[in-house]
Image: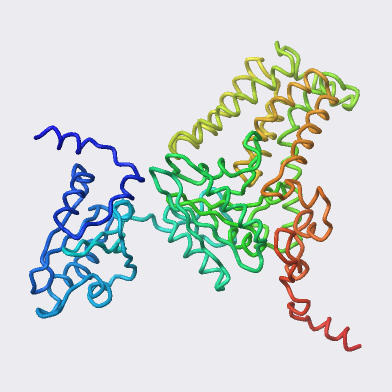
Amino acid sequence: MPQEDRKAEKKVWEPGELKQIPISSSLEQNLALVKRVMGGNADFEMREFVLGGGEKRAAIIFMANMVERSQLNRQILENLMFRIPKDQKVDLDFLRDRVITVAEVCEVRDFWEVFSHVTEGCAVLFVDGENRALGLDVRGYERRAIEEPVTESTVRGPRDGFVEDVEENIMLIRRRIKTPNLVMERVTVGRLTRSVVVLAYIKGLVNPALVEEVKKRIAQIDMDAVYGFRYVEEMIIDNPYTFFPQAICTERPDRVCGALTEGRVVILVDTSPFALIVPASLPMLLQTPEDYYHISGISTAIRWLRYLAFIFSVVGSPLYVAISNYHPDMIPARLLLSLAAAREGVPVPAALEAFMMEVAFELLREAGIRLPRQVGQAVSIVGALIIGEAAVRAGLVSPLMVIIVAATGIASFTVPSYELGVPMRLLRFPILFLAATLGLFGVVVGLLAILIHLAGLRSFGLPYLSPLAPLKFGELRDVLVRAPFWAMRTRPETSKRNWFRVSPWGRSQRPEEEHRRES
């Protein structure tokens, strides 16, 4: 092989260079360049043929495993080779308008567009004598079936969840929101992956400034690869140095639709089964879709139980260490005697005892997640029982400490957002250190530091503690309680306009109410 051909084969083709190469009217030149760029790929295919009964030659290129072959054969190749009359003058416009029957067809004028279409799963048609080509959408790669969400399961809610295909995810949203004001805008990020990112919002409800800000931040992403939602999230959040999530990650279409009707923006990333909701706030992260499928009173009680468990997951073991070490007078005498008897013989102080048990609990939790599902459940449950019982029998820890750490761990499982649960687990260790050194004063200092940090966070301009700080009484009907739907009449401040989402006459009148009104 000549030295020039070897160099050409090893050449790295840059996007700017391919954009400067227009499609030639010579089919041979076009195919020669295609072979130089893509010829070494095992999954690349090129089919040359003659159009209809004439003599004009054409070629179609595609990636073998990313197209639907039946559609390619029946709606494109068969029509091009056998359905064109002999005496018909054939050009690219005639083929697009009268012969090719696929839904999406676009013109391609340079080789950057050619290879972009091919690597996305489309086919590209070249015709001899034409300095243009046609991009044909015949994508047909395998997709995962729509299944129940794994991380956000509900008892009474819908069972469908997002999948890795962004088109399927868009369909799941449009099935629920049937309005022409629902906008889906596509952008491409990643120099190598060219990942499709879809912005979803409802015109008239969303603040236009929020949409422009989200677009601006995504447009500034300049990186080689974007494989999922987390790559986008880290590049667009306000504060990249905090542990707390500043966007809500969900795989439930119903939760996404609820956010859209509140005037928020949803970000979908192709190949990712999760969606991002912005702006986010701490009260939203503590809410679950299950809250809206129960009676309002039951949902309110469960929500308050979740709030208390959220606080206890941070201060449970630190409070025990602080009170037992520095404030034993706060414990009733009989309980104090029982506690002293339980700790008799334990060779380590309470702070080190709590630290050891917390680390062991986190190790078991991590092992249960990383191992296969059948093995992981057995390891997490049996391991906790065996290690806890063995540690108590060996006199390394007291039984009450095992109970406290287990209760703290169980309380952390009630946090609905995994992204919020992880930082709360990590923050337990510095608060435990403050409790061991300063007692209850240290616990209060640690909690105040966290509260001050949360009060200073913003998510796309929205205060992180909103509507608690700054206080907005009208929005507390879906924070402190879960009010009935007919009582939540107005939208939150994220909406462009404070429209009434429930009419004053939107609830059916009960017979006793009608009788009272008549009397």
Image point 28% across, 51% down: which residue?
A: 21
| Rendered position, 372 above or below 262 | above
Picture coordinates of residue 244, whole percent (x, y): 66, 39
Q: Position of residue 171 (x, y in %)?
A: 47, 65
Colour setup of the view = rainbow
Outermost bottom residue = 518
Indicate whether 221 appears above or below 174: above
- The front one of 41 and 258 is 41
Q: Residue at x 80, y 49 (%)?
A: 468
Q: Quadrant of the C terminus?
A: bottom right
Please give the name of the residue rendered at 47% of the width and 34% of the height, measured from the top-left corner: 370
> Vertically, is 64 above or below 78?
above
Residue nearest the observer in this picture, 143 or 3: 3
Coordinates of residue 108 in the picture (x, y in percent): 31, 60
Quadrant the N terminus occupies: top left
Q: Is residue 93 left or right of residue 513?
A: left
Using the image as rendered, state which of residue 126 and residue 438 is in the foreground.
126
Q: How many marks?
A: 0
Q: Is residue 509 above or below residue 456?
A: below
Question: Image quadrant of residue 71?
Answer: bottom left
Q: Quadrant of residue 437?
A: top right
Residue 142 falls in image quadrant: bottom left
Which residue appears at 62% of the width and 36% of the height?
Answer: 240
Quick one: 451 or 183, which is closer to the camera?
183
